[in-house]
Amino acid sequence: MPELYHPVKIGNLTLDGNLFLAPVAGYSDRAFRSICTDFGADFAYTEMVSSEALTRGSEKTEALMRRAPNENHYAVQIFGGIPETMANAARMVLERTSCECIDINAGCPVPKIIKSGAGSELTKNPDKLYSIIKAVVEAAKNYDGKRTDKNGNLVDYSGEIVPVTVKIRLGWDSEHITWKECAEAAIKAGASAITMHGRTRAQGYEGKANWNAIAELVKFVNKRIPVFGNGDAFTPEDAKNMLEQTDCDGVMFARGAMGNPFIFKRTREFLQTGKITEIDMSEKIRAGFRELELLTTDMGEKGACLEMRKRFCAYTKGIEGSAALRKELVNSNTVEDYKNVLKNYL
């Protein structure tokens, strides 16, 4: 039986392992990706980047694409409903970042994303999905400008084609299951990997993810490109079960990593040794303060402290008396406030 933890090849990109941080809106900024990388994530994706906003010159949108200093590899995820705009956005991603992969969001169930013709809306129209993926693949293949390197300098393009991947859902709803058509469209358009979240758009994040469908996708793709599973991976045991039950090439953690970046090293340990090392609360809180420090560097103390309210609530989940603690956390406005609230755990 093949090792469950193993290297993965996405186009010309080779990754050391198969445990990934998903693109999570409002969460997978470079501060959190950096923490997850420290704790063993093999690959991470940015928050989804609007192709419309990027091509219109939004500085806030461009900031979402910045690489964490400790990331050996990372992917920028873009979304949009117009092939030409997505191609232009892909060229901008290539010029302004040193990312090793561009991912296309065809799974987000949020209404404002769907209204723009992007996200899960694309599952309703595999032909349109094909056009969008094809446009981005061609933009990456034909890019001949300069690229930003890991140090932020513009350098001559090396000529290595950056792979394009796509993330999909089962379909729009239970009556419109289109993953097979979407997968075929992605492969024909030149995608180098597919991630499937085992829910429909109608389910959102409710109900149970359908891992059987992920297994069916793996069989359908038949090793033409890698398939990654997403949905209901909250523990190392979940990741092992997903890999065994679906035969997917890798696991993508989303909500399971929130306040829990340790899940990557714990899962790797479990897959390799069958053991799981517990993380004590002091280590969790230290990781939270490291994340706060990184966020403060990127957005200033005020913005970082506001953002860390929800994140420290996640880090402290399970602490005795956590309800009272959360009330204090959500009213913290400075780094010093957090230190005072959490001093007993440092």
Image: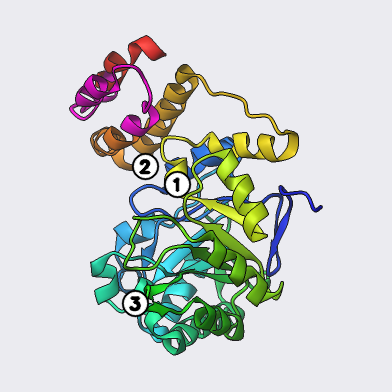
Image quadrant occupied by the C terminus: top left
Which residue is identified by label 3? 121
> Is residue 333 shown above or below 86?
above
Asked if the residue under mark 3 is in contact with the one under mark 2, i.e. CB atoms within 8 Å, the reply is no
Of residue 258 and residue 164, the one placed in the foreground of this image is 258
- What range of the chain is rendered magenta? 312-336
Q: Secondary structure at mark 2?
A: helix
Amino acid beneath label 3:
Glu
Q: Is residue 98 visible?
A: no
Of residue 312 and residue 12, the one placed in the foreground of this image is 312
Which residue is identified by label 1? 30
Q: Residue 189 got which mark?
A: none
Q: Residue 298 got which mark?
A: 2
Counting residues from the start of the chain, the first of labels 2 and 3 encountered is: 3
| Residue 337 image position (x, y, % from top left) | 24, 20
| Residue 8 image position (x, y, % from top left) | 70, 58
Of residue 169 and residue 85, the one placed in the foreground of this image is 169
